[in-house]
Image (cartoon, grey):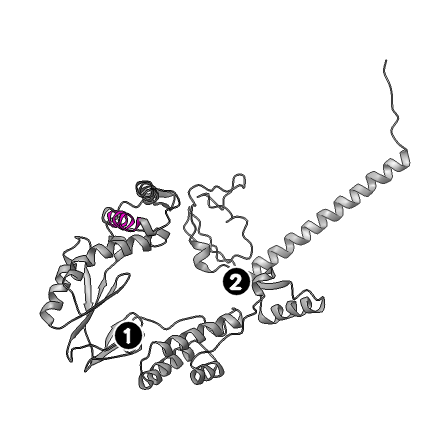
Amino acid sequence: MFENFRFPFSYCIMESFDVSALYTNVSNDSAMQAISEMLSEHAGSINLYSFSVHQLMTILKACLSCNIFSCSSKHFALIRGLAMGQRLALTLAIAFMSRIEAPVLQCRPLLYCRYIDDCFVIYTTQAEMDKCFELMNEQSGHIKLTKDTSQNDWLPFLNVQINIANGICRTKWDRKPSDKNISVHFLSAHPAYAKKAIVTNMFRTATRVCSVSEEREESLALAQRVAAMNGSTNQISRSTRHKGVVRQSRDSTHADKMPFCLPFISDEVSTDIRQCLRRVAIDKYVSVVEILPNNLKRQLIRNRMYDRICSTAKCVVCPEGRIGDCMSSGVIYLIACKSCGEDAEQMIEQKQMEHREAMRKLALQEQKALQRLEEIVDTIQADGPPSRSTSR
């Protein structure tokens, strides 16, 4: 964004503004009014699919009124703010910020850039900057902005640091102090191409956001340290460092193939399956798609739990009606008794012994049932078929 950017002034003031908890503090009425004004202004250039602006606003209002969720068997309705998981939240937040920043744009700053709730502003004097900051904070009673100033002539904004000296803008890659630099570890159970893509994209970003070679070397060194913290191999980092960008070869006919979806087990298993497809000469028509297992977030967070019930009769595992919990397999669980409050602390060895004993008893019952069935068949064959009597 700031590549080869030059300012006509030798000295200027730059600061970045950030909105604290934007989504939970958005005024829905102001956001809907902003959406209505945008639709009315650009109705001629937007495909509304035969809907009128009034009809779209009615649908939008209905969507916002359906923010109902369940927690611990209690139902709640969101009456102010936006749910971060809602698809309309981003659009409404951007529209709301457009109303917040409207008075600032009338003050004509040297430069004003915004990404959702992060603003980058440049003025010629500090007084103008302070007035702009106060003006934005006065636009809504629920919105509060915080600002960052330059440290050692470098200002952090999004994932870059910006320096302006003698009208020349320089940038380099940046990581926030709160960032733990934790990503998918290179030894984790993920496909190799996915882990390589994470490292590749990180080095690609560190390279592209830099303006000159000095900052590029510094950014690549930072990316090297982050990759090493997550167990990345030196070969990937070195190749990325020298080339700047690692290009992945993509099959142009991949979209035309039939997907063969399989749960991801390991790279070796996936390779063996692809080799089997080549042996039977169907690799040109079938593409292996590896599906990762559900992580902890996907298992704990679910949508529309309130209108789903468990289908198991008299189920004691799903008292809240969360469908599928009682039918889950391979689950590591900790059960607490509501009467005494103690947890089930049985050892895994004991659980295995109980399972083996249950399987042994089941096999013994099946064997006895088969023996009893054979005895009945032998008795019937020895006595002959039962006689049929007719009554008149």
Report whether 284 appears left or right of 79. right
Q: Which mark is residue 2?
A: 1
The residue that disc 2 covers is 292
User: What's the residue type where badge 1 is placed?
Assistant: Phe
Q: Nearer the viewer, residue 252 or 30?
A: 252
How would you rate the neighbour count of disc 2 (Cα within 10 Å): few for under 14, some for 14-19, many for 20 or more? few
Q: CA distance from mark 1 to mark 2?
A: 38 Å
Element type at mark 1: loop
Q: Quadrant of the C terminus?
A: top right
Q: Which residue is at the front of the view, 44 or 189? A: 44
Majority secondary structure of the magenta segment? Answer: helix
Of callouts 1 and 2, the N-terminal one = 1
Which of the 4 image quadrants contains residue 146?
A: bottom left
Indicate the secondary structure of the residue bearing disc 2. loop
Q: From the top left corner, tell me how far across and down residue 314 is, in percent.
A: 52, 39
Q: On the image, which quarter does residue 225 sit in? A: bottom left
Report x, y in % for residue 91. Answer: 32, 54
Q: Which residues are magenta?
A: 31-43
Decide which of 48, 294 is in the foreground and name it. 48
Q: Nearer the viewer, residue 160 or 41?
A: 41
Q: Residues within 10 Å of mark 1 (few under 14, many from 20)?
A: few
216 falls in the magenta region: no
